[in-house]
Image (cartoon, grey):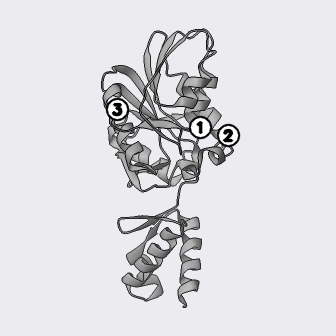
Amino acid sequence: MLAAERRDFLLTRLHADGKLVAKDIAVELGIAEDSIRRDLRELAAAGLCQRVYGGALPVSPAAADYATRTTVATSSKQRVAAAAAALIRPGSTVLLDGGTTALAVTAALPDDLAVTIVTHSVTVAAALVDHPAAEVLLIGGRLFKHSAVTCGAAAAEAAGQVRADLFLLGVTGVHHEAGLTTGDADEAAMKRTLARQAADTYVLASSEKIGTASPFTVLPVTSVSGIITDAPDDNPVIAELLNRGTTIIKAR
């Protein structure tokens, strides 16, 4: 099998199985595992897979630029946002992450819900300008344009002064082995900082993020209170998460 044929085979198998295990593919094809790892490196460099220990996972479509992400899985994000908004109690303080699903949460908040929203997302803050009952605190810092959020030392220091009841966390990948991932190291660090400031952290995970991975780990799944998703229970990643005791809040 030529190298190009192997790469086509790997992509087909990745799409069918949702993951690749290098040693298993090497045995199946009767070639050296190093050859498979080299193929995976080339596919990852082309943005066609995300390498993880022992193999590869699909790349998350949520890793695209902000404008593109506003058009991806919009109905799925709205379902997740509605389920997330239902977790917010009157009078509570909520840390709301950036991203398009978090933006959808702002639209799902009832007009009469008195709540304090703390966010490092300029788009989330702007969307709440006309909310009649929400107090909005915007965390300043260096603007990370890919997600329209602030990051860096100033943002982390300001976030460290917050004590929240709930953090609604946005990620680009959710996987039982790779964990909760995103595409930028500084953004991942900021998300961890925000998670430390909340009593409970729930992940906003529209279905296209389930079973995918991005380069930087935010948190292991065991570090969050639960995952809000509209992915079906028979999704193999959801089934494994449930088997491991992860709380899954179904978005209908």
Q: Are marks 3 and 1 in contact (CB under 8 Å)?
A: no
- Residue 154 — which label? 3
The Cα atoms of the two marked residues, 1 and 2, are separated by 9 Å
- Residue 224 lies, with reference to residue 119, above or below; the image says below
Amino acid type at circle 2 is Thr
Mark 2 closeness class: few <14, some 14–19, many ≥20 residues within 10 Å: some
Q: Which residue is mark 2?
A: 74
Q: Residue at x 58, y 85 (%)?
A: 5
Q: Residue at x 56, y 11 (%)?
A: 113
> Helix, strand or loop at disc 1?
helix
Q: Nearer the viewer, mark 2 or mark 3?
A: 3
Amino acid type at circle 1 is Thr
Residue 21 point in image, percent of width and height: 42, 71
Q: Residue at x 42, y 82 (%)?
A: 26
Q: Residue at x 54, y 30 (%)?
A: 122
> Helix, strand or loop at disc 3?
helix
- Residue 100 — which label? 1
In which quadrant is the C terminus drawn? Answer: top right
Residue 192 seen by the camera: yes
